[in-house]
Amino acid sequence: MGEKANIVVVHEDGTHELHRTGWAVGIDLDLLDGPDALLGTLPELRRDDWWLDDDLAHGGVLLDLGRKTLLFFTWEGPSAELRHRAATLALIRAAWPGWTVRPLYDGPTELRTHLGLDPEHVRRRGTPLDPAPFLAPDDEELTGPDPGGILVTLDTGRCHVASAAFDHPAREGPALLDRLADAPDHGTCRLHVESGVHLDPERRRLDWWSLPATPQAYEVPRLWPGWTVRFHRDDWQQHARRAPARFAPAPFDPGAPAVAAVLAEAEDRRARRVRHRALVARLHPGR
């Protein structure tokens, strides 16, 4: 519960309220119950005017009641998992009939842009880049069905996986190519990674995608001067088509099994929140 998120409610008259929650991981699951249920949780949240920035916002939700628009992003949760993203988005859209539901890719800046506010207010500028280490195929970070990780492939026939707990490799610019020289080669990646980069050094072209939000996602082109940069948002299939010998994720069923898994996770989250409320009530009577 240390990961934080902003929840923004835009009223029909255009005014908005800014709330903060410590339940950012899995915040996409909270959307499965629809708008009334989410609005019902707001009284228990802290309301203030503090916007979480690029580094601190692990998630975010905006409900525009007048336009019936739902915007959201998360760093962790089923919508950021290859096996469960399609099912999660389908369940959310079913729970918000008549609403435009749009996942975001650049975090809190997009929430502020929707409100007509300066996105720079939540940019974390000037902090040194923290390059992601490249992992060996047997690294424990890559175990489990949803290990995360960021796939980096090259037209020259190499395949590497970087940790997702650091800055995205796409933000490194051409210096990334030097780091790849000593990176462990995975041969063909069958992992359900959460993001990917494909590099064609000869044509100076970079294609990338991501399921979780990535700070400054739409600013990547300026970090690669002279390169053609294409951001495919959550379209991981284009990566598999572009590098079929290097990215072939293990088969999975995005239908009923994925829906059941997401619903089970949502039910577990509801139960944990009930227990948390009971604990708070015992520790702070009358609160």
Image (cartoon, helix red, strand yellow):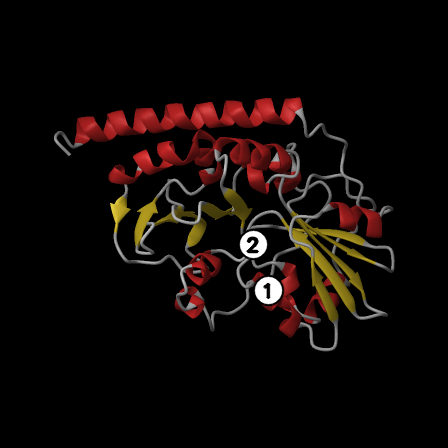
Question: Which mark sits nearer the N-terminus, 1 or 2?
Answer: 2
Q: Quadrant of the N terminus?
A: top left
Residue at the disc numbered 1: 218
Left or right of 18? Residue 24 is right
Answer whether residue 186 is visible to the viewer in this image.
Answer: no
User: Residue 51, how many percent across, how many down?
Assistant: 35, 58
Q: CA distance from mark 1 to mark 2?
A: 8 Å
Q: Label 1 amino acid? A: Tyr
User: Residue 260, how many percent across, how many down?
Assistant: 58, 22
Q: Residue at 20% x, 28% y: name it.
A: 281
Answer whether residue 248 is visible to the viewer in this image.
Answer: yes
Q: Residue furthest bottom?
A: 226
Question: For the residue labelled by badge 1, is the local secondary structure a helix, a strand or a loop?
Answer: helix
User: Residue 262, how many percent across, how many down?
Assistant: 55, 28
* Quadrant of res 112: bottom left
Question: For the residue labelled by badge 2, is the local secondary structure a helix, a strand or a loop?
Answer: loop
In the depicted structure, whether residue 35 falls above or below residue 115: above
> Foreground residue, 80 or 40?
40
Contact between marks 1 and 2 (CB within 8 A): the answer is yes
Q: Label 2 amino acid? A: Tyr
Left or right of 46? Residue 108 is right
